[in-house]
Amino acid sequence: MLCLLMLPACGYQPLHGANTPAAQQLSLVQVNNIPNRLGQQLRNSLIDRFYIDGRPVSPEYTLDVALNPSVIKLGIAVDDSATRAELNVLATYTLRNAQGAAVLSGTTTSVSNFNILRSQYATLIGEQDAYDRSVAQLSEDITRRLSLFFNRDPVTASAS
């Protein structure tokens, strides 16, 4: 109990809680369309994370994301068929201010695995689950990186 009482005194503060500078700035980011189904899923996940009270009326930032997924077959069986696959999704993102200048850019990668089974349906479900896990990982990582950017110096971040 004593540790919980001393926790606020150590300078700990949430990264993107309801009343942090990051939460206020994230709600001003317009997430642009991302091509393909995977891009739609990532965009929806980012929108769910960014907007507390609905989409911004006059966004101060725009976020562009490009995705590059690839599937690598692993675990080769005796008959030369693959039994396992690795899904790599590379996301390149750019945060631009209202003037269109890039204020933050970077890349993040998600790696998920799935089994290749005799049943095509089971393999399809496993692959879709790997894509869903990748979207969740990418969304969390992009949100974390933008939150760190906005929490560094919110005045400088909004002036950029």
Image (cartoon, helix red, strand yellow):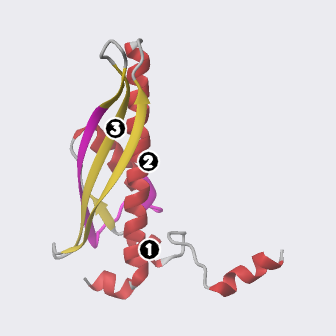
Q: Give the quadrant of residue 79.
A: top left
Residue 127 in the image, given as x and y percentages of width and height? 38, 29
Q: Secondary structure at mark 1?
A: helix
The residue sitting at 27% across, 70% down in the picture is 61
Q: How many marks?
A: 3
Q: Which residue is mark 1?
A: 22
Q: Give the quadrant of residue 18.
A: bottom right
Whether residue 133 is visible: yes
Q: Which residue is mark 2?
A: 136
Q: Quadrant location of the N terminus?
A: bottom right
Query: How far, Cα to Cα, is label 1 from label 3?
Result: 31 Å
Relative vertical location of residue 159 with respect to residue 16 in this rendering, above or below: below
Residue 118 in the image, given as x and y percentages of width and height? 41, 12
Q: Which mark, residue 87?
A: 3
Q: Secondary structure at mark 2?
A: helix
- Amino acid marked by disc 1: Ala
Q: Secondary structure at mark 3?
A: strand
